[in-house]
Image (tube, rainbow, N blue to C red):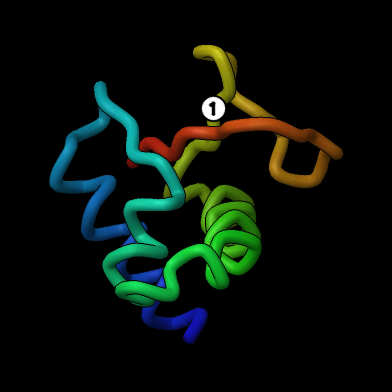
Amino acid sequence: MSDRLREAILRLARERGPDKTICPSAAARAVGGDHWRDLMDDARETARDLARRGEVEITQKGEVLDPDATWRGPIRIRAT
């Protein structure tokens, strides 16, 4: 499942471009359909992994987050 989430996050973020962001729920919906809520933790963790690799940035209120830091609340994902 994480491979599918990874692909969905990268595809959706790249389609939006580096100046716009996506919500992790967009990737969860693309992969999980009606059961997307069950994938939210996995989508956020996959986004962290991608950010560690430099493939995306995770933002919150316009600020780039450290993927290894502890954070809570809504995040957005941007292609790098």
Q: Residue at x 23, y 52 (%)?
A: 12
**For residue 46, above or below residue 73:** below
Binning the other alpha carbons within 10 Å of mark 1 as few (below 14), some (14 to 19) or many (20 upward) gives: some
**Residue 50's x, y, as percent?**
52, 57
In this view, the residue farthest toward the right is 70
Query: Image check: 45 left or right of 3?
Result: right
Which corner quadrant of the image does residue 5 belong to?
A: bottom left
* Residue designated by label 1: 59
Quarter-of-image position of residue 27 = bottom left
Determine the residue positioned at 45% across, 50% down.
24
Where, by quadrant of the figure, is residue 36 drawn?
bottom left
Q: Is residue 17 left or right of residue 73?
A: left
Quadrant in which the C terminus is drawn:
top left
Measuring from the top left, give residue 31's x and y in whole percent.
33, 75
Which residue appears farthest toward the bottom when viewing the image? Answer: 1
Which is more toward the observer, 40 or 21? Answer: 40
Give, as a three-letter code, the residue at label 1: Thr
Whether residue 8 sits left or right of residue 74 in the image: it is left
Q: Residue at x 33, y 52 (%)?
A: 26
14 in relation to 18, above or below: below
